[in-house]
Amino acid sequence: MKWYEMQGKDKDVVISSRVRLARNIDGYPFPSRLDEKSAQEVISKVRAAFGDAYTYTDLTALTPLEIRGYVERQEISQDLANAKGPHGLLTSDKSGVSVMVCEEDHMRLQCVMSGLALKEAYELVAEADDVADSALDIAFDEKLGYLTHCPTNLGTGMRASVMMFLPAMTMSRQIQSLSAQLQKLGLTVRGMYGEGSSAEGCIYQISNQITLGITEEETLDKLSKIIDQIVVSERQLRESVGKNDELCDRIARAEGVFRYAKMISSSEFMKLYADLRLGISTDITQGISFEKLDSLLVRVMPANLMLESEQLSADEKQRDKLRAEKIRSIIG
């Protein structure tokens, strides 16, 4: 099952957790400096290291729409989607781990899980890292740690992030102060698709910035403790907001639009999603699960909507109709 179809810990506030490790093969330039022959060599070495347990997808053979679908599902980064030379993706349905090949680094090993599951995701990625380390000569320095394209990843090469749903903090305008506080602690706050994306639907990604001079375990422990505190604060703020008539009416209207509207745009969906998710977490809305709602977060985005419906040439108006139909079919 995909991460967005599962029930995870603290799901009312934490949508998903992701752990990513940046690794490079010694003796080869970083992907931005690789010629086509060398890039193909790197890809062959990585594929051989992981063997038949992983399925390889040559992303250069896909259409822009298919590539966008991977981004919307959080399976690849925007940087990999924009890559020019040979590049691809290794996936394991069994472990849930994937490997982006020839993105900014030769390998980006990652695992995304539902809810707050940083340590569980790390354990799975660490197993894959052991596989890579045993089969490949990984670039490593005794002082600097793992050598990476971006100096900010030197050391562990690990980025751990949590995608959080924070409507109460957004409504109370505490997000700005939270972001400033987290920055002082070596963490950063971004939108749903990471760097450069906006925080639509009250969704924020919180991740570590420091990778040098700290262990993976210390990073995960620090981030987990801070996320726990944010979860408590968000829940307390939701209690203080209360189930007032205005909020209840807004959530009821959102549910009504989801159940009966004939056309829904992407931007409207994100606003309604936030209201309805808040309704589920405060028991105002009954009969709709987080799993169903979060699956919509992927399945009604433009690329995945068109791919799933097999209407690859749908224009914006047609997509809005398809989106409304898909929402009704999923939430019942």
Image (cartoon, rainbow, N blue to C red):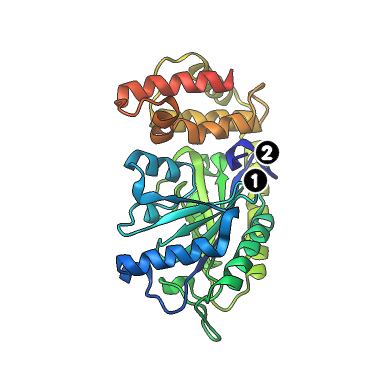
> Dot 2 surroundings within 10 Å: few (below 14), some, or many (20 or more)?
some
Residue 285: x, y in percent? 63, 23
Q: Name the amino acid, label 1.
A: Gly
Q: Residue at x 41, y 71 (%)?
A: 150
Q: Name the amino acid, label 2.
A: Gln
| 55, above or below 154, in the image | above
> Dot 1 surroundings within 10 Å: few (below 14), some, or many (20 or more)?
many
Residue 199: x, y in percent? 44, 45
Q: Is residue 68 visible?
A: yes
Q: Secondary structure at mark 2?
A: loop
Q: Is residue 187 visible?
A: no
Q: Which picture quadrant has residue 221?
A: bottom right
Q: Residue at x 35, y 47 (%)?
A: 61
Q: Residue at x 52, y 63 (%)?
A: 48
Residue 259: x, y in percent? 52, 16
Query: Residue 115 — which label?
Result: 1
Mark 1 / mark 2, whichever is N-terminal:
2
Q: Residue furthest bottom?
A: 143
Q: Which picture quadrant has residue 323?
A: top left
| 33, above or below 50, in the image | below
Q: Which picture quadrant has residue 142?
A: bottom right
The quarter in which the C terminus is drawn is top right
Residue bearing the label numbered 2? 7
* Along the line of sight, the residue nearer the viewer: 28 or 73: 28
The quarter in which the N terminus is drawn is top right
Q: How many marks?
A: 2
| 47, above or below 247, in the image | below
Is there CB contact under 8 Å for labels 1 and 2?
yes
Q: Secondary structure at mark 1?
A: loop
Q: Residue at x 55, y 44 (%)?
A: 169
